[in-house]
């Protein structure tokens, strides 16, 4: 089936963003347009036509980055489950993802992205917006869940989401690097330790 012009344009954009992610994961700020275009099976002219140049492609790549945790399986959890059970499932999922063979490449990409964005205000702004979006998705999993006889507020959920994201990222890196081979239940125990009035804050 022949693609429409709009479909072809979208497919080429997707190919270039995916290629940029792979090349940046290897080369960081030294990534070359020629290498990205070649990997995508396109020309450097296509990059200029679709994105305007390297910087705008890098902005699109960072904007497209969804973070290390795919929340889709967790979002399918019964909304009536209490907070502790949802946090436990998030922790188990993060442990499984950290043990995945592709996790090392993910960690390397994140490191290269930091190398890329720290000296570029536009890219840094996009990365910060992406992080805030991930935190908001995370917090949405917890908002309204029952804890201590009352529903978790949006502000409480955000505080927990930020603390949990920081904890799981650190634990996940230790698994990827082989520093510690912690079990899923160890991830769960530490995640549960964050569900306290001090972390959640006032209702």
Image (cartoon, rainbow, N blue to C red):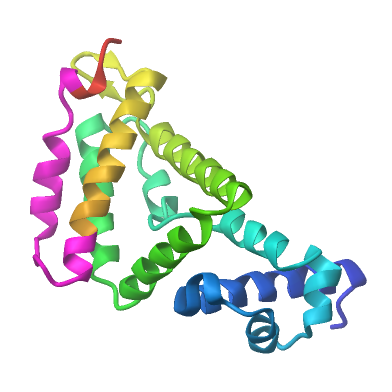
Residue at 68%, 74% in the rendered image:
16
Q: Which quadrant holds residue 68?
A: bottom left
Q: Is residue 138 left or right of residue 159?
A: right
Q: Is residue 181 left or right of residue 88?
A: left
Residue at 79%, 85% in the rendered image:
43
Residue 39: x, y in percent? 63, 87
> Where 149 sits versus 24, above or below?
above
Residue 2 visible, this angle: yes
Residue 3: x, y in percent? 86, 77
Q: Which quadrant holds residue 176?
A: bottom left
Residue 7 visible, this angle: no
Foreground of the two, 131 or 78: 131
In the image, the segment drawn in magenta is 173-198
Residue 180: x, y in percent? 8, 65
Residue at 20%, 34% in the rendered image:
84
Residue 179: x, y in percent? 11, 68
> Where 101 sits versus 179, above or below?
below
Outermost residue on the top side: it is 203
Quadrant location of the C terminus? top left
Residue at 41%, 50% in the rendered image:
71
Foreground of the two, 92 or 103: 103
């Amino acid at each position: 089936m022949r693609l429409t012009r709009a479909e072809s344009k979208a497919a080429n954009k997707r190919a270039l963003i995916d290629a940029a992610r792979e090349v940046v994961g290897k080369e960081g700020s030294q990534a070359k347009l020629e290498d990205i275009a070649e990997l995508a099976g396109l020309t450097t002219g296509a990059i200029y036509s679709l994105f305007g140049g390297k910087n705008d492609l890098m902005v699109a790549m960072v904007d497209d980055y969804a973070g290390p945790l795919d929340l889709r399986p967790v979002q399918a959890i019964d909304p009536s489950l209490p907070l502790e059970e949802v946090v436990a499932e998030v922790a188990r999922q993060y442990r499984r993802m950290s043990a995945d063979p592709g996790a090392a490449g993910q960690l390397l990409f994140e490191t290269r992205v930091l190398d890329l964005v720290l000296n570029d205000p536009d890219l840094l702004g996009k990365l910060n917006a992406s992080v805030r979006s991930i935190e908001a998705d995370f917090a949405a999993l917890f908002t309204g869940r029952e804890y201590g006889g009352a529903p978790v507020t949006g502000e409480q959920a955000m505080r927990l989401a930020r603390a949990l994201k920081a904890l799981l990222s650190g634990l996940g890196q230790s698994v990827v690097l082989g520093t510690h081979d912690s079990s899923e239940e160890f991830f769960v125990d530490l995640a549960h330790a964050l569900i306290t009035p001090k972390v959640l804050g006032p209702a």
